[in-house]
Image: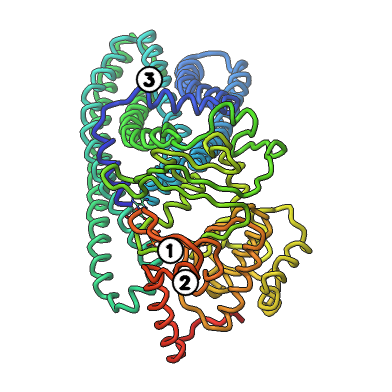
Amino acid sequence: MANSILEEKEYQSKAFDRSCWMRMLKILWEEKKVVICLLAANLAFALTDIIFPLFNRYAIDMYVVGQASQESLPIFIAVYAGGIVIRSICLYLYFRYAGGVESSFGKNLRKKCFVKLQNLSFPYFDRTANGWLMARITSDTGRLAEILAWSLMDLIWGAVLIVGITAVMLAVNWKMALAILVAVPFLWFVTMYFQKRLLSAQRKARKSNSKITAGFSESISGAKTTKTLGVEQENYEEFKIKTHDMKTYSMRAARINSLFQPVVFLLSGIVLALLVYIGGNQVLLSVIQFGTLSMFINYAELFFEPLKQIARVLGEMQMAQASGERILSLLDEEVEIDDSDEVKAVYGTLLEPKEENYEPLLGNVEFRHVDFFYNENEKVLSDFNLQVKQGEMIALVGETGSGKSTIVNLLCRFYEPKQGQILMDGKDIQKRSVGWLHSNIGYVLQTPNLFSGTIRDNIRYGRPDATDQEVEDVARLIHAHDFIMHMPKGYDSEVGEGGDMLSTGQKQLLSFARAILSDPSIVILDEATSSIDTESEKVIQLAIKELLAGRTSFVVAHRLSTIVNADKIIVLDHGLIKEMGSHDELMKQKGAYYELYTSQSLLEKQQQLLSIESEPLV
Ligand SMILES: Nc1ncnc2c1ncn2[C@@H]1O[C@H](COP(=O)(O)OP(=O)(O)OP(=O)(O)O)[C@@H](O)[C@H]1O
């Protein structure tokens, strides 16, 4: 959230950005059918606004003051009534199509942002805060949709009305027209003065609101930490300051608005008085008829409304421009890791893959002279070389920050090597498709990522076409079936947001089942650090055995007891391979691995003695 506030400041200093609005209009035009209908309804409505004072003038001059034959009155009444019906229809269509434009433009823009986010690579997400992205997709798209559907139409309505009324007034009586037009600069100045202040107060109120929303969100997600640290009082005090700011700015906006309305009222009152004075004299001198004076009074009242609207909309557009620029910055973001055009031609894109062209992967992997860094001055991997044969289990061991996750990130092509190559079945992964690569990799995270829905939905997540029988078979294979059947609705039990209604071990089992069901050739397992009770540990170990069987696997190992059977254990130190070999070989070397393993075994034994247990599976 803080990020989004910073960005807002930066963007709002810019003047009117024509290219930004042109691009937004281009996106709006993608829904041209509904936009044309809205424009037509808007235009027709503005025309009826201009025409009705003319009707009134005719009625007064002909039937009230004048001596026109009453025979034509029914025809006039019919035309007048027809005009009212047309005006009502225009109003109905205006609201209907404006609502339509707002929702279809919003949907279109959200879709564009979502597709972009799906394609963007990990380096972008490293640089960009989640809160910032959330604000783009929710509030910025919503604000732009509202502005383009409603405010822009108000602007067009206002412009048509001003031009139309001015033209009619000048044509009928230029002197009286000038009496109204002379007030325009004053009214414009007053309106802009108040609008500027009003917008500034509203902007501050909105920023405070963002802080309050962020505060709410953090207090919900961090509720456990807050309670255990007993900092409710401090949080409440901080929250009180934020809500106080919000109240101050909102009150300021209300004060400015309450002053603005009477000032405009006063100004239009003066203009009306002037008009009645000049017009009244002209009526007395028989220069104009009474109906004409009435028409001018109607127009004078109508004239100031669009002026106010235009000033309001221009201010709103200036504010919304920041939203537009932020969204365009997201849409223009370059996808750093993308398939070449030749690869796309064969394998399709991420959203439209040609899976029929995906070739099978045996699972031979090679890192060849790979260099990598996240930040230029901090090398993470230097000339990293590793050859893995189909079906081998590789365990990555090392201190925190030694580069274990980086290796699997590169393998998944979440990042590209700065130098060197990664080959799969002998072919550089940069020459293969990202979609193909990910369809062949099963990545089981340390903290399993479950989604709201049922157990069945979660197991099926990577293969929506899997049958119920296949889901059940895979759950039995990893010994998860029993705990699932103990749940109130079995496979149809809800797991809650992020799987909150399950224990860590249960979540892990479901993520294993999900990975096995997708049948990947390569499995990456970021092994859990959390200690679970011995019974659950046994079940998890059995499940891991099933998960890795017959597949090439990379296990980021935290508990060394789980990787003693690995074909190769790689001990990393600052991105370099310090030791490599089987468990027995490394134990014989009595080096870093030996030290780590013996100290961990000792600790585990001590923990067992103290019977530290947590979260049983069933
Ligand atoms: N997204 C990132 N942006 C910048 N630097 C990063 C990023 N991810 C990791 N690093 C840095 O790269 C180095 C290697 O990190 P990596 O996550 O690969 O270590 P690790 O061995 O997996 O650590 P752990 O066991 O704690 O998960 C660390 O110095 C870390 O600070």
Indicate the quadrant where residue 420 lies. Answer: top left
Q: Residues within 10 Å of mark 3 (few under 14, many from 20)?
A: many
User: Which callout, 1 or 2, points at the residue further toward the start of the chain?
Assistant: 1
Residue positioned 24% across, 66% down in the render: 238
Residue 109 vertical placement versus 486 (above, below): above
Q: Quadrant of the C terminus?
A: bottom right
**Nearest to the observer: residue 585 or residue 31:** 585
Residue 8 seen in this snapshot: yes
What amino acid does circle 3 point to? Ile
Q: Residues within 10 Å of mark 1 (few under 14, many from 20)?
A: many
| Distance Cα–Cα, label 1 vs label 2 | 8 Å
Indicate the quadrant where residue 95 lies. Answer: top right
What residue does disc 3 label? 162
Residue positioned 68% across, 53% down in the render: 463
User: Which callout, 1 or 3, points at the residue further toward the start of the chain?
Assistant: 3
**Percent coordinates x, y for residue 488 in the rendering:** 68, 77
**Percent coordinates x, y for residue 598 in the rendering:** 40, 78
Outermost residue, front side: 588
- Residue at mark 3: C-beta within 8 A of ligand 1: no
What residue does disc 1 label? 397
**Nearest to the observer: residue 223 or residue 389:** 389
| Distance Cα–Cα, label 1 vs label 3 | 75 Å
Proximity of marks 1 and 2: CB atoms separated by less than 8 Å: yes
Which mark is drawn over residue 575?
A: none
Which mark is drawn over residue 560?
A: 2
Residue positioned 36% across, 15% down in the render: 166
